[in-house]
Amino acid sequence: MALQMESQAPPIKVETWLRGEPFASFQPGKVYVVEFWATWCGPCAAAALQLVQLQEKYKDVGLEVVGVAADEDASSPVEVRAKLGAWLAEKCPDLNYRIAFDPTGEMNKLWREPSFSVGIPTSFVVDRDGHIAFIGHPRQLDEVLPKVLNGSWRASDEAKTADTARIARSGALAREQGLKKPINDRFWAAIKIEDWTTALSAIEEGIALMPDNISFRLAHVHLLLHRMHDMQKGMPVMRQLVRDAIDRNSQNWMLAALGQLFSPAHDHSHFPSAERFAMGKKLSEHILALNPPQADGPKFRSYPAVARYYYDSGNKDRAIELLRLALKSLEGPELIPDAQKQHLLPDLLQTLASYKAGRAVAALSSRVRKTFSPRHQSASGRKNT
């Protein structure tokens, strides 16, 4: 049975509670946010901070937040609990809501699968009479939650339109996930035991089935270049990814390709340097053309990746300039949740400080090279004889 707006909320069936008191049942008169998340999910950290703020803001008008970790991957429940505890302590030290751990998959069966919710973080809002009022990304909660709390949301045309669009979009994603699942299962099983040949076979099967799937395309590049270090096969695949990203004029594709070439998480020492920087230049220029420095568009999503290219290519002043624009855009006209700002700000500031330090070292090195150039040393030698 499909789970959508107006549906009765399913029960919360969880045996392990990591934070807060065990949850018994939804209480009439209260509004609940049931949030699905995982430690490996990048956006989940910002979502957790946002939920802390929402719980504090609306606790006196009946809001209760319940976080559910139902997608953890580890060898034992003890290992998972330790990982979850460490993640919460680091990412969300001021946690003020319940956190459940469900290793059985029961919560996914009750909540996410019937609602076609294939991704995380995903928020379910349960209104005061125990019905589903909203299903979607937590970034929408700042707008939706006040309307659920005052009782105006579920009857609105806005809510009905949003849920209809979500079902159409999520249904298509769920069907795609069904096709991808056996391929992903084979791929990740092979990755776990470092069987690169089997992993490559699974990904190539996926690309043959879905040639426009960016996840498969990225996995293909990453496997060949960063796992197998096969430059002969990997570089043509990388070139094609860059061409397709530019032809699509897609910022997401271009940023993904740029990450394979310049992310500090990867070792690029075995890459052909000239071609790597040529591709980086092309991608960076197209990204900046889509969102020019003088335009009002948000810079914090794309400019840090472009700055990395300029920094690695030696243009440290340009890298610093772009990072400053990324920081400035956090206060720009686009409304950005405070939780997302808190999540992004430390990394941007740390990177900016690192780039400034690198520029200072480079300037000092340049002065030292000039001071001890062969010509200067020769002149010094003549003077001393």
Image (cartoon, rainbow, N blue to C red):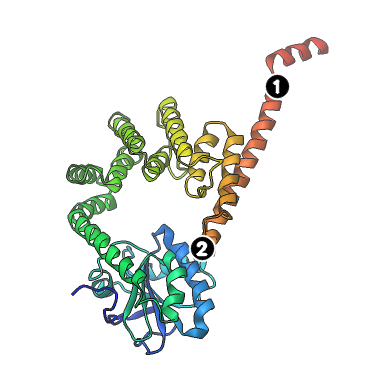
Q: Is label 2 in a helix, a strand or a loop?
A: loop
Q: Quadrant of the C terminus?
A: top right
- Residue 337 bears which disc, if any? 2
**Residue 15 locus on image (x, y percent):** 32, 81
- The residue under the point 52% across, 31% down is 313
Q: Nearer the viewer, residue 25 or 354?
A: 25
Q: Is label 1 in a helix, a strand or a loop?
A: helix
Residue extending farthest to the front is 157
Q: Nearer the viewer, residue 39 or 110?
A: 110
* Tag 2 and tag 1, C-beta contact below 8 Å: no
Q: Amino acid at mark 2?
A: Pro
Side (left or right) of 247 relative to 184: right
Q: Amino acid at mark 1?
A: Lys
Q: Quadrant of the N terminus?
A: bottom left
User: Eyeballing the image, is 314 above or below 170?
Assistant: above
**Closer to viewer: mark 2 or mark 1:** 2
Side (left or right) of 188 relative to 146: left
Q: Nearer the viewer, residue 141 or 305?
A: 141
**Residue 303 locus on image (x, y percent):** 51, 44
Q: Which residue is mark 1?
A: 370
User: Of the residues under marks 2 and 1, which one precedes in the sequence?
Assistant: 2
Measure the alpha-carbon separation of dots 2 and 1: 49 Å
